[in-house]
């Protein structure tokens, strides 16, 4: 397949970075089945490779983009926001199961992360005893994480990082923060990957890279296709959190961790990322050909649980625009006469 990669947000640092990241991944591709083209008209698929611009939560600029309007059937979107909703067909790492539909969307891995924990890359050099049953290092932002962070389970370690973000720290503090995180993970037999604001989490893929078995705790998570999740990860229902020690007690954590690392190397690492993203697009195309029904995406959005969030976002954007217009109006801000 020939893929044309573009961003609807050329002025946004993230938009340029994500598209460039994927082009670089294509250069490292070891599969040789798909290519990048600069010509959208001759491309088999057009991919808007986006991050999460704050003012356009639902990527409407992509939906109304001239390129998508000219080629609606072959235009796709990669979008990693926590509240992702498929107004445009595409790959969404954090799409919720109720919003996912065959022939319209696919789950995905997190690609083109501007902020990554560099210490993870070197963590396999650590030789430490796996004396912790499990660990979780992350922000308290939902009920599932709250229960994990407040549970008292022997031989585990959980850390609430709410309000402490790596990208806001100075170089020395950030290096220490990231190193402590990796050392905790290295000591763990299992790494919990609970849902956060969205159903997916970076920790799932960091666990794979670290060679540790991820424990996926997210009822609405949509698994990225092609990856053999059942061979190296453990799924636990959100209602089963109290049973974690029993569920994990006899699992072969060393073997599962080895398989997790192998899966990361074969499906997630840079030489493979481009290939499997395009394969996901091809999967959506094939499912659509098989008769997956389509409906107006805006009607679907307004019928979903994200309706109120969408309306509030539109009102905030309109308010900002109105304030800007009032500031530019003739006489705005001028002292009253008299």
Image (cartoon, rainbow, N blue to C red):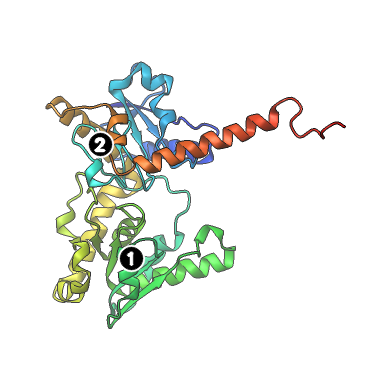
Residue 44 seen by the camera: no
Mark 2 and mark 1 residues within 8 Å of each other at the beta carbon: no
In this rendering, the answer to whether 221 lies above or below 311 is below
Number of other residues with Cα within 10 Å of mark 2, as a class: few under 14, some 14 to 19, many 20 or more: many
In this rendering, the answer to whether 76 lies above or below 191 is above
| Residue at mark 2 | 105
**Residue sitting at 82 percent across and 33 percent down?**
336
In space, the residues marked 2 and 1 are separated at their CA atoms by 27 Å
Q: Secondary structure at mark 2?
A: strand
Which numbered dot is residue 145? 1
In this rendering, position of residue 200 left or right of residue 321: left
The quarter of the image holding the N terminus is: top left
The quarter of the image holding the C terminus is: top right
Asked where in the image residue 256 lies, by quadrant, the reply is: bottom left
**Residue sitting at 20 percent across and 49 percent down?**
227
Q: Which of the two discs, 2 and 1, sits closer to the camera?
A: 1
Q: Position of residue 238 (x, y in %)?
A: 22, 63
In this rendering, the answer to whether 338 lies above or below 313 is above
In this rendering, position of residue 233 left or right of residue 160: left
Which numbered dot is residue 215? none
**Residue sitting at 28 percent across and 54 percent down?**
264
Q: Give whichever of discs 2 and 1 has the lower sequence position.
A: 2
For this orientation, the residue located farthest to the right is: 338
Q: Secondary structure at mark 1?
A: helix
Q: Position of residue 290 (x, y in %)?
A: 12, 27
**Residue sitting at 37 percent across and 22 percent down?**
68
């Amino acid at each position: 397949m020939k893929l044309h990669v573009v961003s609807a947000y050329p002025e946004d640092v993230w938009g340029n970075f994500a598209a460039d990241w994927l082009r670089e991944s294509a250069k490292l591709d070891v599969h040789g089945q798909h290519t990048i083209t600069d010509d959208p008209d001759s491309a088999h698929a057009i991919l808007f490779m986006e991050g999460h611009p704050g003012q356009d939560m639902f990527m409407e600029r992509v939906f109304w983009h001239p390129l998508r309007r000219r080629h609606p059937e072959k235009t796709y979107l990669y979008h990693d926001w926590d509240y992702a909703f498929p107004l445009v067909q595409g790959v969404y790492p954090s799409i919720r199961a109720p919003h996912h539909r065959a022939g319209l969307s696919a789950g995905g891995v997190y690609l083109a992360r501007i902020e990554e924990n560099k210490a993870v890359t070197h963590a396999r050099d650590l030789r430490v005893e796996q004396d912790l049953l499990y660990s979780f290092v992350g922000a308290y932002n939902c009920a599932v994480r709250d229960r994990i962070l407040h549970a008292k389970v022997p031989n585990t370690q959980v850390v609430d990082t709410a309000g402490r973000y790596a990208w806001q720290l100075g170089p020395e503090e950030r290096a220490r923060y990231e190193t402590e995180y990796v050392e905790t993970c290295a000591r763990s037999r299992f790494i919990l990957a609970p849902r956060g604001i969205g159903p997916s989490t970076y920790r799932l893929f960091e666990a794979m890279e670290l060679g540790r078995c991820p424990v996926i705790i997210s009822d609405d998570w949509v698994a990225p296709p092609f990856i053999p999740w059942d061979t190296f990860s453990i799924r636990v229902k959100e209602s089963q959190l109290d049973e974690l020690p029993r569920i994990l007690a006899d699992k072969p954590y060393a073997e599962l961790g080895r398989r997790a690392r192998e899966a990361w190397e074969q499906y997630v690492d840079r030489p493979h990322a481009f290939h499997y993203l395009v394969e996901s697009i091809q999967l959506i195309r094939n499912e659509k050909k098989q008769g997956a029904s389509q409906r107006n995406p805006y009607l679907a959005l307004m019928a979903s649980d994200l309706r109120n969030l969408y309306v509030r976002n539109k009102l905030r954007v309109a308010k900002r625009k109105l304030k800007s217009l009032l500031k530019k109006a003739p006489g705005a801000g001028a002292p009253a006469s008299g």
